[in-house]
């Protein structure tokens, strides 16, 4: 995928050589290596390909495959749909997903810090937006009152 | 009052810098209107009919004198010299320029204030009642938990793009003055047998197009679980609430669709994963926050004051104001005072000028401990006034147009800004309020009528809470002209009820006559000192309909 940011030790960087190809609709060419397939399609024949979930998809359906999946992507059909934040929380904090968790779809600079806090570690920034500009949105604010995936302790336990 | 520490201050200043950058990017065309919209809404900024409106958060309705002076300075420097207090205890500035908003927010941040999440599909300002901490019938001071909730819900990354707005209210008194049955989550705080603080959790209340009273999902929840339980409710709502239709997106629709038992079961299952985890509140945190709400240095005063008694006896107008606008206080010799923002047609309900704000700030220091409250009824409350100071305060309040003796009376109208300002409104609210206030200008008569709440909303979004007014007026659009539908029998508080529509709607010009007939019917059927709402409950709508729609009855007879 192009226009990708990834969290790595020491910070985030723009990834220019991401090997994954996002397949939105499998009919239009699902051959090749390293595909990110829609959940329903992937479940038909679980493989070494990666999977993406829409906000209506049930994250629980991935439970049997978490040990072997190479990558999970969660879709933001619009940036105003916040369900993927809760899906990310469940995958990371409840189901223990340690692999790459990628935000796809309407992924914009001003929501990146929320995504990062909810456990996403790679971000396929919307194609018409500058990835370099989006990098500035990852840090967010220095204070988090509540808690999140990457900081499970509320501020009152850190204050 | 809660005092900001370095964390709280860093958060509001960083937020100002973040929004300043977003405004600049929007003005430079780097952010589309669609992308900018939720960003500005979550910073309190609406686009209204004529200009931007900025809604400033007044957490649980509590302000210091210094904060009130800052609001006054914003009114005079950036607006047209006034602001509008809302039913959710916030303040709205109506005439704002976009490029000045970051400077306004910076000025607010300097006095520990902000406009974060006063709009948008996120957790809004946490509200409680205006007399929290001082009411004679209070069980437990709800402010520490309200502040803890405010912090927890502020920029909580998982819950910033909920299906729809989310309102939480908490109260802990014999009377429910925070309308907790009308909130997405209503919390009732009470002491258990061993004195431990417990919470009753109510969900799914709300007004708007589908007015519903909330339903209880949990009784006796120990306070330490407040945040984990609210988190469980929010996660269930965020995952399963409808997003296909904004009018069906509030949590009340989800609760109704699943049924309260199934919804409660979902929440309990989610909560089992969270309970006793890091979100569990600690005694240390409660004490840290509660330490900011310790009672001020009250003097030891006698329960009666001789001079006060003399003024009461000599001055009927003062006595009337005391009877309506002065509330009992938990400390002997003190009272809480309601400064009415409803003087009559001269000023719309909730509107307060910068000069009035400065005067209120001065009075709060001269007669109290520098603290001010905003009431759900859009009035201003001075929470700690000694009885001996009431007469002096009353005189000053009268000079400033804040001394109307009408708290809880028919002219203490709750009204949204309506079609004069709001882009959503179907009809104007303010001229209707003014016409009713002009018609009922005989204070003796109003006092004889006793408690009557009258609420006006300019559209079915119900910002004026018309469903829970004893008399509710809803602006509706009929073929491009403004009409008003009337409901009777609504109530807030422990005996919350939704009003019932009396029949076809009326033109603006007819409304004062209709209200007069409704009141006339009440007077005719009233028994002794019966309250309006009790008379309506006893005799039903028919006698009112007969009087209001005489011709229709002749036709059907």
Image (cartoon, rainbow, N blue to C red):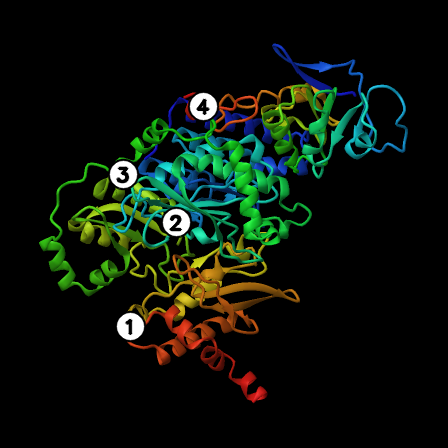
**Marks 2, 4 in one chain:** yes
Measure how far apart labels 4 and 3 are at the Cα level. Answer: 25 Å
**Marks 4, 1 in one chain:** yes
Residue at (30%, 59%) from the top-left corner? B404
Q: Earlier in the sequence, mark 3 or mark 2?
A: 2
Residue indicated by mark 4: B10
Q: Does residue B497 appear left or right of residue B331 in this picture? A: right
Q: Earlier in the sequence, mark 2 or mark 4?
A: 4
**Marks 3, 2 in one chain:** yes
Vertical arrangement, residue B317 with respect to residue A75, above or below: below
Question: What subunit carries mark 4?
Answer: B
Give the SS element for disc 2.
Answer: strand
Give the SS element for disc 4.
Answer: helix
Foreground mark, 2 or 4, reads: 4
Give the SS element for disc 1.
Answer: loop
Q: Earlier in the sequence, mark 3 or mark 1?
A: 3
Measure how far apart labels 2 and 4 are at the Cα level. Answer: 31 Å
Q: Outermost residue toward the front?
A: A64
Residue indicated by mark 1: B529
Residue indicated by mark 2: B352
For residue B321, what is the image quadrant? Answer: bottom left
Question: What subunit carries mark 1?
Answer: B
Q: Does residue B103 appear left or right of residue B384 in this picture? A: right
x then y, percent, for residue B154: 49, 33
Residue indicated by mark 3: B370
x then y, percent, for residue B396: 24, 51
Give the SS element for disc 3.
Answer: loop
Asked if the residues shown at circle 2 and circle 4 are in contact, with their CB atoms under 8 angstroms apart, the answer is no
x then y, percent, for residue A11: 62, 13
Question: What subunit carries mark 3?
Answer: B
């Amino acid at each position: 995928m192009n226009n990708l940011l990834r969290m790595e030790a020491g910070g985030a960087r723009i990834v220019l050589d991401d090997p994954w190809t996002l397949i939105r609709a499998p009919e239009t060419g699902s051959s090749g290596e390293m595909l990110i397939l829609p959940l329903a399609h992937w479940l038909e024949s679980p493989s070494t390909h990666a999977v993406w979930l829409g906000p209506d998809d049930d994250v629980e359906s991935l439970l049997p495959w978490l040990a072997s999946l190479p990558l999970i992507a969660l879709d933001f059909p619009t940036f105003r749909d916040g369900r993927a934040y809760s899906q990310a929380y469940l995958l990371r904090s409840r189901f223990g997903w340690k692999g790459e968790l990628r935000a796809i779809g309407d992924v914009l600079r001003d929501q990146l810090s929320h995504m990062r806090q909810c456990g996403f570690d790679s971000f396929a920034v919307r194609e018409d937006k500058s990835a370099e500009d989006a990098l500035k949105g990852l840090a967010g604010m220095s204070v988090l009152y509540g808690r999140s995936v990457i900081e499970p302790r509320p501020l009152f336990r850190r204050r | 009052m809660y005092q900001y520490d370095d964390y709280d201050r860093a958060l509001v200043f960083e937020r100002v810098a973040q929004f300043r950058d977003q405004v600049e990017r929007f003005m430079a065309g780097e952010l589309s209107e669609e992308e900018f919209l939720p960003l500005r809404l979550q910073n309190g900024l609406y686009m209204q009919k004529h200009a931007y409106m900025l809604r400033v958060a007044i957490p649980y309705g509590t302000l210091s004198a210094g904060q009130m002076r800052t609001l006054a300075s914003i009114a005079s420097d950036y607006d047209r010299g006034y602001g509008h207090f809302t039913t959710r205890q916030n303040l709205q500035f109506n005439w704002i320029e976009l490029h000045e908003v970051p400077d306004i927010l910076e000025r607010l941040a300097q006095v520990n204030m902000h406009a974060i999440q006063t709009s948008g599909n996120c957790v809004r300002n946490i509200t409680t009642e205006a007399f929290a901490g001082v009411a004679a019938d209070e069980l437990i001071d709800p402010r520490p938990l309200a502040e803890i909730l405010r912090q927890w819900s502020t920029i909580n990354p998982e819950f910033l793009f909920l299906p729809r707005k989310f309102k939480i209210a908490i109260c802990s008194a014999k009377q429910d003055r925070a309308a907790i049955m009308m909130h997405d989550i209503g919390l009732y705080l009470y002491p258990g047998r061993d004195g431990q603080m417990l919470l009753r959790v109510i969900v799914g209340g709300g007004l708007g197009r589908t007015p519903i009273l909330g339903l209880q999902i949990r009784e006796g929840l120990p306070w330490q679980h407040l945040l984990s339980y609210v988190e469980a409710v929010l996660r269930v709502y965020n995952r399963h609430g409808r997003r296909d239709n904004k009018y069906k997106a509030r949590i009340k629709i989800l609760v109704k669709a699943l049924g309260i038992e199934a919804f409660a079961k979902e929440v309990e299952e989610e909560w089992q994963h969270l309970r006793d985890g890091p979100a569990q509140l600690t005694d240390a945190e409660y004490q840290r926050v509660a330490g900011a709400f310790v009672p001020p240095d009250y003097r030891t005063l006698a329960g009666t004051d001789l001079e006060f008694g003399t003024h009461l006896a000599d001055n009927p107008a003062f006595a009337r104001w005391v009877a309506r606008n002065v509330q009992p206080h938990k400390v002997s010799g003190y009272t809480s005072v309601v400064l009415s923002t409803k003087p009559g047609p001269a000023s719309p309900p909730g509107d307060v000028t910068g000069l009035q704000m400065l005067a209120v700030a001065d009075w709060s220091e001269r007669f109290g401990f520098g603290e001010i409250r905003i009431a759900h009824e859009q009035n201003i409350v001075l929470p700690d006034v000694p009885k001996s100071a009431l007469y002096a305060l009353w005189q000053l309040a009268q000079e400033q147009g804040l001394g109307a003796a009408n708290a809880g009376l028919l002219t203490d109208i709750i009204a949204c800004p309506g079609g004069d300002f709001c882009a959503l409104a179907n009809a104007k609210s303010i001229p209707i309020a003014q016409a009713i206030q002009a018609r009922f200008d005989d204070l003796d008569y109003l006092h004889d009528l006793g408690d009557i709440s009258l609420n006006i909303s300019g559209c079915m979004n119900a910002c004026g809470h018309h469903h829970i007014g004893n008399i509710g007026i809803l602006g509706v659009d009929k073929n491009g002209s403004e009409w008003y539908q009337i409901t009777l029998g609504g109530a807030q508080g422990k005996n919350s009820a939704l009003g019932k529509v009396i029949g076809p709607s009326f033109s603006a010009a007819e409304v004062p006559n209709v209200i007069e007939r409704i009141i006339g019917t009440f007077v005719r059927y009233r028994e002794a000192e019966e309250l309006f709402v009790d008379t309506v409950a006893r005799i039903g709508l028919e006698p009112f309909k007969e009087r209001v729609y005489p011709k229709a009855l002749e036709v059907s007879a």
